[in-house]
Each structure stands twice: as C-alpha cells, then as structure tokens.
Amino acid sequence: MPYAPEQEHDRAFLEQAVAQSRRSLGPDTTKKPFGAVVVVGGEVVGVGSNCVVEDCDPTAHAEVVALRDAGRRLGTYLLEGATLYSSCEPCPMCLTACYWAGISRLVYAADRHDAARNGHPDLQFYRELALPNGERGLLDEVPVDGSVRSAAVGVLAEWAAAQPEPVEPKL
C-alpha cells in the first residue's frame, strides 16, 4: 500500500504523541522517548509512552501501551477505523500490533533511520526480519518437527474447526 496523504488534523494529534514522548525526558535516563495516541472519530481513545524499563516488560512500547489503553476504554481488541499517531515510526513489533488491532491509519514523525541514529535498534530489526529464517543472526530459531509439531498443528486445526464461520487460510 502506498503512503497515504496527510490529513488536516494529523499534525495536532501527532504533536500530542510527540508531547507524550517528551514526558520521558528528565533525570531518569532509563525511560525511552516514545509516545503514541490512538484516535477514533476525532477523539483520543488511547495514550501511551514507553514503559519497558519501569514495567519490566519488553513489549511495553508506546504504541502497544496506547493500543492496550484504547482497547480497555472501548472494550474491544479490534480498533478498525482508528488511527495511531506515534512520535516515531513503530518498530516491527508495534507495526504488527497495529495490524493485529486492525488500525486503519498510522501516522508518525521520526522514522526508523532517525531512531537508529539515536541508538535505537529498530532499523536493525527491520533488516533482520527481511532475511529468511535460516539467515537471521540475532537469536537461534529452532523449528521442531515430529510429534510435537503434529500436536501443535492439531490444536490449531481444532480451533479452526470450532469457529462459527469457516476459517480462510492466510497462505
């Protein structure tokens, strides 16, 4: 999908995300400077800043925190029609979280190259994920075959068979 055009209200919400990231600055240098807001129908429904260190949670990135906040407030994990505004281009994990949530638009200020120039590994992760599994080097990936795989596939198949509508393969 090509880049979408900027909309009239994007800058105001993006400024809120950047302001959220700025709150991370201060004497506690362990806090990461990222902020995000989720907007539905012109209203902020989720706010997040990076809480990885204080929550001891490697997934507590600003975007994920904002998605969690929006989900709690709206009572749903599906945020179709929502826009996520982020102070920086989301890392691969956060981008995928946007996909899982059904976010319709993503608007960001700094990009992955800006993050890399300032010591954040997002660009490295994007490059790593573009490689075939056997060529990745940041961790050891060990696919296991045999009865364990068969059992795991069986659980997936049982879940799919139990759905009220036929499951469409995503191959």
Image (cartoon, rainbow, N blue to C red):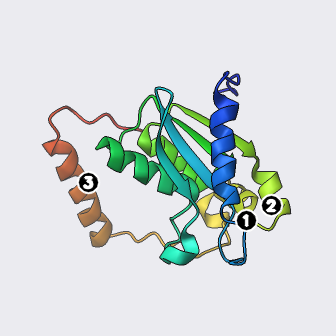
Which comes sooner in the sequence, label 1 or label 2?
2
Quarter of the image that includes the N terminus: top right
Crowding near the residue tagged with mark 3, few <14, some 14–19, many ≥20 C-alpha atoms within 10 Å: few
Give, as a three-letter code, the residue at label 2. Ala
Q: CA distance from mark 1 to mark 2?
A: 6 Å
Q: Is residue 124 above or below residue 163?
A: below
**Hey, which quadrant is residue 15 in on the image?**
top right
Secondary structure beneath disc 3?
helix
- Reply above or below: 2 against 25: above
**How many marks can you see?**
3
| Residue 93 visible in the current orientation | no
Q: Earlier in the sequence, mark 1 or mark 3?
A: 1
Mark 2 neighbour density, 10 Å: few (under 14) some (14–19) many (20 or more): few
Q: At which x and y percent is residue 51?
A: 55, 68
Q: Earlier in the sequence, mark 2 or mark 3?
A: 2
Q: Are marks 1 and 2 in contact (CB under 8 Å)?
A: yes
Q: CA distance from mark 1 to mark 3?
A: 33 Å
Q: Which residue is mark 2?
A: 116
Question: Measuring 50% from the left and 55% from the top, which residue is drawn there?
Answer: 64
Residue 37 numbered tag: none
Residue at the spot of label 3: 156
Left or right of 30 on screen, residue 94: left
Please name the amino acid that badge 3 sits on. Leu
- Residue picked out by circle 1: 121
Residue in view at x 49 percent, y 57 percent: 65
| Alpha carbon separation for disc pair 2 and 3 | 38 Å
Mark 1, secondary structure of its residue:
loop
| Residue 96 at x, y percent in the picture | 52, 48
Horizontal side of 22 relative to 71 (left or right) equals right
Q: Nearer the viewer, residue 69 or 23?
A: 23
Amino acid residing under circle 1: Pro
